[in-house]
Image (cartoon, rainbow, N blue to C red):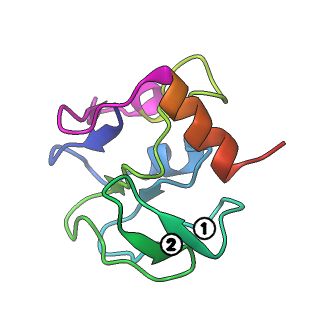
């Protein structure tokens, strides 16, 4: 499952610098799938919606840092642990119970965003 940042976040930003997928953004910041990845052109989301990798998307939160679930791989393919959760001083990076993915799916997503 992807991770989510709770509203206990103190906006320190440590988690953002640790994310290998550039899936973590500051409050109120718009985001793109292409940011920090090799994604380009159109892509199909898990919902089946087709979007441009370069389109700006609305922030998930205006109050605290947030994680884009479609970009989060729980650090599978990069680290042995979820880096955002391991560095968060407030333990705000927690599993998102509404976004479940298998390790195979997470690895496929990581390879899609960062082909070798």
- Identified at 35% across, 32% down, the residue is 89
- Identified at 26% across, 49% down, the residue is 10
Instruction: Check the image and report above or below for 115 versus 105.
Output: below
Q: Are marks 1 and 2 in contact (CB under 8 Å)?
A: yes
Query: Which of the numbered marks, if any, corresponds to residue 32?
Result: 2
Image coordinates of residue 91 in percent, x first then y, are 28, 29
Quarter of the figure with the N terminus: top left
* Magenta stretch contains residue 13: no
Query: Which of the numbered marks, if any, corresponds to residue 35?
Result: 1
Please state if 88 lies on the left or on the right of 74 as rendered.
left
Asked if residue 75 can be seen in this view, the reply is: no
Q: Secondary structure at mark 2?
A: loop
Q: Secondary structure at mark 1?
A: loop
Image coordinates of residue 56 in percent, x first then y, are 45, 82
Where does the magenta region start and end? Answer: 85-103
Please state if 104 lies on the left or on the right of 70 as rendered.
right
């Amino acid at each position: 499952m992807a991770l989510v940042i709770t509203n206990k976040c103190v906006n320190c930003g440590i988690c953002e610098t640790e994310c290998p997928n550039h899936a973590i953004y500051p409050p109120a910041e718009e985001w793109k799938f292409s940011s920090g990845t090799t994604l380009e052109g159109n892509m199909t989301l898990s919902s089946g919606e087709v979007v441009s990798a370069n389109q700006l998307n609305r922030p998930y939160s205006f109050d605290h840092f947030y994680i884009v679930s479609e970009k989060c791989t729980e650090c599978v393919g990069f680290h042995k642990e979820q880096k955002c959760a391991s560095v968060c001083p407030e333990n705000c990076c927690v599993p998102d119970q509404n976004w479940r993915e298998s390790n195979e799916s997470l690895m496929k997503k990581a390879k899609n965003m960062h082909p070798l």
